[in-house]
Image: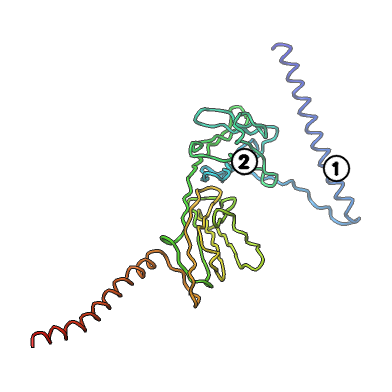
Amino acid sequence: MPAAWILGYLLLFCLTKVSLMVVVVESKVRVDARNSNTKEGEEQPLVVPEFDPNEPKEPHFAEDSPKQVVASVGSPAHIPCKPRNLGAKSVSWIRHRDLHVLTVGSFTFTNDERFSAHRDATTGDWILVIRRPTTADSGFYDCSISTKPVTAIAVKLNVVVPTVELLGDGEIYLDRGSTLNLTCVVHFTPTPPEFVLWYHRDKLVNYGKPGRAISVETTHDGDTTRSSLLVHNATMWDSGKYACKPSNAPRVARMVHVLRGETPAAMQTTTSSAQCARSSLPLFLSFHLLISLSSFFIPYAHSLYR
């Protein structure tokens, strides 16, 4: 056997022995520290190190590490992975379709400034963030640990396009003094929009204007966000175009007409019912006029034939 091999074995034996001595010394220090807090004559507690036999010692990913993430256009996409027992190893994010290294640790290795990565100090998870994602960003992303061979897990990102609607059909008609209620619904938005803005006549609605009772309530449930605008005791000035603009969807608008009603109405009316009422008025007047004329001409015709 070559002398170099023998020297190597001896060096490995010495290092192993030194490591064992360090472990024994550390254990003795812990036991002495506990014994110092124990009164004389009491039984010394048995020190048993915590050990989970099912927990792998080498770097690995947690079993509940996500395999699929859904994000929406316009809202930041957060793609997590859960590496454990990293030690001195690093975590990298790689885009699967072109094998482009996006980040290594917290350092970004792409010219696309939308990408960044950070470690959650509470959970230890590593999260890839894509600001302003588009549908083209959909696909697989590999979270890898710098072991030999590399340990990696693939996460599929699906970027969806939100849609938005203002509930109701056509233009809205309501009497002066009524409450205007507009509800904007954003669909296919897994994460809530960063904001939902309301506009009146292309100007941002002023919720804090003195003397006006205007309120907005926004809720999120599943992949749907609802925002309701309430304008109490509406006046003629509240007529005009209203628009709802979420941060991740196009703007939608609706025309509102506040009528000069003497008695405030309790409900608002859409275009269809208002047009029906207006279109039936001329028909009613024509029918009434026909009856009036017939009541005059029929007796007159009878008198001519006598």
**Residue at the location (53% across, 36% down)?**
154
Depth check: give the residue in front, 298 or 116: 298
Q: Nearer the viewer, mark 1 or mark 2?
A: 2
Q: Is residue 250 above or below residue 295?
A: above
Dot 2, crowdedness within 10 Å: few (<14), some or many (≥20)?
many
Find residue 13 and report its horizontal and vertical position in percent. Answer: 76, 25
Question: How far apart are labels 1 and 2 at the CA level?
Answer: 39 Å
Q: Secondary structure at mark 2?
A: strand
Position of 300 compared to 213: left or right?
left
Tell me the SS state at disc 1: helix
Name the disc covering residue 127, or none. 2
Q: Quadrant of residue 86?
A: top right
**Left or right side of 236 for 49:** right
Give the residue type at disc 1: Val
Circle 1 is placed at which residue position? Answer: 29
Q: Judge by depth and name the residue closer to the eye, 285 or 1.
A: 285
11, above or below 227, in the image: above
- Which residue type carries mark 2? Ile
Residue at the spot x=90%, y=50% of the render? 36
Q: Position of residue 2 (x, y in %)?
A: 71, 11
Tell me the quarter of the image containing the C terminus.
bottom left
Instruction: Return the x and y of residue 225 as percentages of the image width and height.
Output: 52, 56
Check disc 1: other Cα within 10 Å, few if <14, some if 14-19, many if 20+: few
Would you place residue 292 above or below residue 154 in this image? below
The answer to which of 106 and 77 lies nearer the viewer is 77
Image position, residue 186 (x, y; %): 50, 54
Q: Nearer the viewer, residue 48 or 199?
A: 199
Quadrant that contains the N terminus: top right
User: How many numbered marks have been drawn onto this rendered protein structure?
Assistant: 2
